[in-house]
Image (cartoon, rainbow, N blue to C red):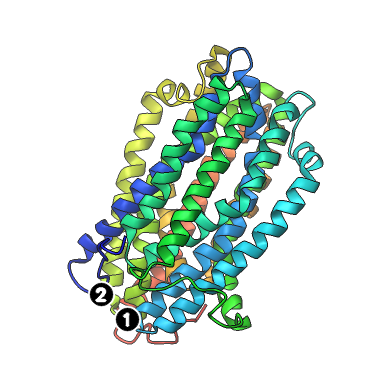
Amino acid sequence: MAAMKQVDFANGNIRQNVLKTALPMLAAQLLNLLYNIVDRIYIGRMPGEGATALGGVGLVFPVIMLILAFTNLYGAGGAPLCAIARGQGRKDKAEKIMNTTFLLLTGTAVILTLLGEIFCSPLLYAFGASDVTIKYAEPYLRIYLIGNIAAMISTGMNPYINAQGFPGVGMMTILIGTVANIILDPIFIFVLGMGVAGAAVATVISQCLSALFVIRFLRNPGAELRLKPLASGRPEMKTMKDIVSLGTASFIMQFTNSLVAVACNSMLAKFGGDVYISVYTVVSSVRQILDTPVGAIADGSSPVLSFNYGAKKYDRVRAAIRIVTSWAFLYTLVMWILVILFPGFFIRIFSSDSSIDALAVPALHTYFFAFIFQALQYSGQNVFKSLNRKKKAIFFSLFRKVVMVVPLTLILPNIGGLGATGVFLAEPISNFIGGTACFSTMILTVYRKLGKQGGVSENITKT
């Protein structure tokens, strides 16, 4: 691993630097996506109970999103600060940020695991489970929580590998877990006859393998920053505060994803029953697939943005913003066209049940109607996060999901007989308004100032 090539963020063509980090990140994210959805693909094809089991497992994902929110709080919060410190030439500070993150992740993982096991059943009922779907949701969640510490370490510490300029190693972290999960899933689900519980066991084993790889690399002499939490001294309260402060935006984004999923499941259960929860599981899974590349483009550029901002190379920051925005917009436009023309292709990835297909096609068309505006949301939000603009990052995380999606999800089904269609209509409305507002604000308050000499010479911790 020591021979892995490190990307020099400070020099060379900025487009190539973004590509060198974004492409491995894209591959990693696609692998991570496959890692996350492979359970759903296999479960949806369980003989005689696939559709119901898929809906049951779908109820678990809001809980997993909540856990991921805490992972992002520390991982996505500390990694940009780590990259900025590297750009300033402050290796000791960068290393302290990374080690503090590790302690925060492991401590929080223990607490969340205990709470999840204690309140598993009431939590799932609160998230929309019925007496039918709980039989699938509860065993999956209880087993998943056993590997929660490993999941939070592998996901939360991987950004620090990318922040050091080793995107290839970061990709390997995901590759190991994904390959293991793909191989183990059919063995545990079908060969050993464990069903939903088998899918969870395969996931736990895969998460443990990824976590071991991350820890091994970060403790290896080939890493620029070394993982040594117990030897790095007592964690500083200021460092923890800075990590949590910047990570709050990513936490809110993921937390509100869970909130939206709960709201959608609740309203769909009311207006359509368990079959519509299965439809939503399919639609949201397709969204997860198509969101992944545009998210990877943004995330892949983050270390480049943060490092050059810390080094005060603002022309390179502006160039990276332009590149990422144009790539993201082109991708979302193409994907939107494909969803409109070939909805059945995407639906059949997760279900071959004709009763779900008939409902999922119009739901998919409605849900993705304004998908291209996701490019603007990702671009603007990524700049705010990467350049440590905490207040704006937090505001736009809250604005699109909490201010818009959740209220619209609860209100629209009751208007004009929209019913379940109203649940799926909330997404494109929020994409259009939220994406436009976020990107416009980024252009006016950050991008233009980066082009003015001395316009951003203030302290980098400005919110």
- Give whichever of 19, 315 is nearer the camera: 19
Q: Is residue 79 left or right of residue 236?
A: left
Residue 75 is at least partly visible in this image: yes
- The reply to whether dot 1 and dot 2 touch (C-beta < 8 Å) is yes
> What residue sits right under mark 1 in the picture?
311
Quadrant into which the N terminus falls = bottom left
Q: Position of residue 217 (x, y in %)?
A: 40, 62
Q: Position of residue 141 (x, y in %)?
A: 68, 39
Against 42, residue 240 (above or below) is below
Neighbour tally class for label 2: few under 14, some 14-19, many 20 plus, Cα within 10 Å: some
Circle nearer the N terminus (1, 2): 2
- Give whichever of 458, 429 is nearer the camera: 458
Q: Residue at x 40, y 76 (%)?
A: 84
> What residue sits right under mark 2 in the picture?
10
Residue found farthest to the left: 12
* Secondary element at image label 1: loop
- Give whichever of 352, 329 is nearer the camera: 352
The image quadrant of residue 419 is top right
Structural distance between the alpha carbons of marks 1 and 2: 8 Å
Amino acid of disc 1? Ala
Amino acid of disc 2? Ala
Neighbour tally class for label 1: few under 14, some 14-19, many 20 plus, Cα within 10 Å: some
Q: Position of residue 18 (x, y in %)?
A: 27, 60
* Secondary element at image label 2: loop
